[in-house]
Image (cartoon, rainbow, N blue to C red):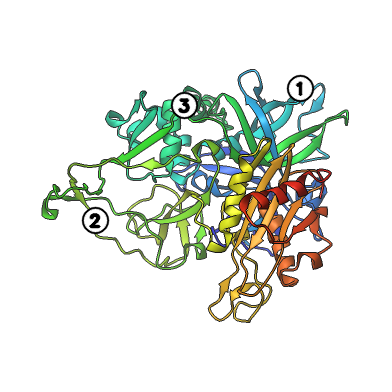
Amino acid sequence: MRKAIPRIKEFPDDGRIWRVDWFGGVERNHMVPTEPKIQLIISPLLDGATDYAASSAVNHEERHTISIGVGQLPIVSIGSLWLNRHCLVEAAGKDKIFHNLTISPDTVRLVKSDTKVDGHPLILKRFHQIGAGLAANCLAIKWRDDPYGIIVPITEVIRFYYATSTELAKAIFAGDFRHDLGSIVNPAEYAFNEQENRCLLKLRKEFADADAWIIGRILNSQEAFAGATLVHDSMIKEAVQNKPRLYPEAAFPFIGSTNMRARVKPMRTPDDRNWRYIIFALEHCTGPFPFNAITCDRDNSNLRPEKDEDLPDDQKRPAFPVKQASDKDITDGELQSDNEPSNNVQSAVVTQPEERFGALANMELEKPEKEMCHYISADVVRPLALPTDLLGTGDGTYSDIGVTPTAMETERVRQAPLPASFENFEAMIRYLNELPRYQARIRPIKDPIAYIPLTKPRWTRQWSYLDSGRKIKRAVVIADVIYEQRVYSLIEFQWREGESFKLALMSLPNGMRMSDELMNKLLYMLAKKNGRWENAAPLPADACLATLKHTWPCVEAYADAVESKIKCGNNI
């Protein structure tokens, strides 16, 4: 089970795996007025299902809807799988990269989920059944001369581009960027330095530093501001008609070309001649940002000046205490949407490391230098240890009802330095990336692929441990190499002194990127075979495997060996 996020109370707790099929409408939450709810359409998987995205994989007769607070939207996507309220590592859908995808008014159109195109439903029932989400909005993107080649649910556009944290989600759905900007930034002190192409922000205390990237994009891009404010504006128009559920609109936050990676559901066109793609979850986008640098400050910042010219501490005002996790593991709690959290309890944070925007890869969030600091760190408010295991994402009240205020936040992945044993691998990938027609990049370190999985109880000795006595697992590094529209994955792992293993080069028959979940399965199989790739066959998903011995005298020779394997008939 995935332990990075808490359980969500609204999902069934019946021992079955439930798939999120679609997003429904947004509705008022009378129990938590500070946070509206959004519908999720879910279905139970059938026993023995292997292709989790298939229409035949679920029991459609038992499909139903649940509603969760919009502050939980950052951790839920279409195709996610849930068992006993826990989100599983695996998810429905296939990874696909859309190269040189053009986003513009000429290539993107707003459509309803139940739109008919040339007399046929936009989303054919034999490929994917939506249920109660038929009235939801989507963006159709032109792909390979098909104006409906890619279909993205609007709520997924909101989740990926705008509602990247709990506070941003609530601000987007409340319309705060248009109607209450002062609750997000200090309006008098946000600016744009055209000479440096730099965004300058002063965030309010509720927003995390990582939110600055999204806020800066919205405030300095006409397309991003229009897309973000359209969410609330469109719901206001629908609310005038007294509809119980509202289906928001949105738009992409940029115009131009992008490479977009997503988890998709392929779908045949009605004439069976071509493929269309339903986006379950967006994962990475290289679309442009309106700035090349960003400086983020706070009204109550306690950053100290470099020189000894600071005010004495007794003349400073206390800064707001930072959010911190509870004494008890936050993932032991359970998110719910029927009670406001208690603001008498210190806030807890669920941090999701990710790398979703390619334009930010080499950009740092800078803090301003200070001549004098007027604030001092406040005394930390000790939290209750999740007394009722209940968590909430509403704004909260000052009642003592035992619900811990909780926020989902993203944390930009800055690729951590690799262990020394991976130094040559890292250098080889940099070298390969500079070659014509190649793109090579090391994957961000995430739970499913950070280490060789254990195959026995954690207290027992096993190959998966680099050091069984100290329970140190073998670290893994994976790089993706794109050549002629095909994605190849290189897998390396740590050795003990005296060991010798091979580098693995893998690809899928269709050339798509191998998912982290599939990689996790492969690493588990490898662990069962004590690191011997040649003994791990047959591989899942008909994955193709080539191995390379570590006999290279230099980085260039290392890269040449990999390149030779890739070019060898362009299949491995």
Quadrant, the N terminus: bottom right
How many marks the image carries: the answer is 3
Q: Which mark is residue 274?
A: none
Residue at x-position 69% and y-position 57%: 519
Which kind of residue does numbered mark 1 sit on?
Answer: Asp
Q: Which residue is mark 1?
A: 145
Q: Position of residue 377 (x, y in %)?
A: 24, 55
Secondary structure under badge 1? loop
x, y percentage for residue 543? 80, 53
The residue indicated by pointer 3 is 225
**Relative to residue 31, is residue 106 depicted above or below?**
above
The residue closer to the viewer here, 321 or 173, is 321
Tell me which amino acid carries mark 2: Ala
Visible in this render: residue 94?
Answer: no
In the picture as drawn, the residue positioned furthest to the top comes out as 106
Residue toward you, 443 or 47 = 443
Does the image show residue 571? yes
Which residue does the image show at 35% across and 51% down from the upper left?
397
In the image: residue 407, left or right of residue 566: left
Query: Mark 2: few, some, or many residues within 10 Å (few <14, many ≥20)?
Result: few
Separation of disc 3 and disc 1 at Cα? 29 Å
Of 523 and 402, nearer the camera is 523
Read off the residue under disc 2.
Answer: 378
The residues bearing labels 2 and 1 have C-alpha atoms spaced at a distance of 58 Å
Where disc 2 sits, the SS reads: loop
Q: Do labels 2 and 3 touch, CB within 8 Å?
A: no
Across and down, in percent, residue 548 comes to: 74, 58
**First of labels 2, 1 by sequence position:** 1
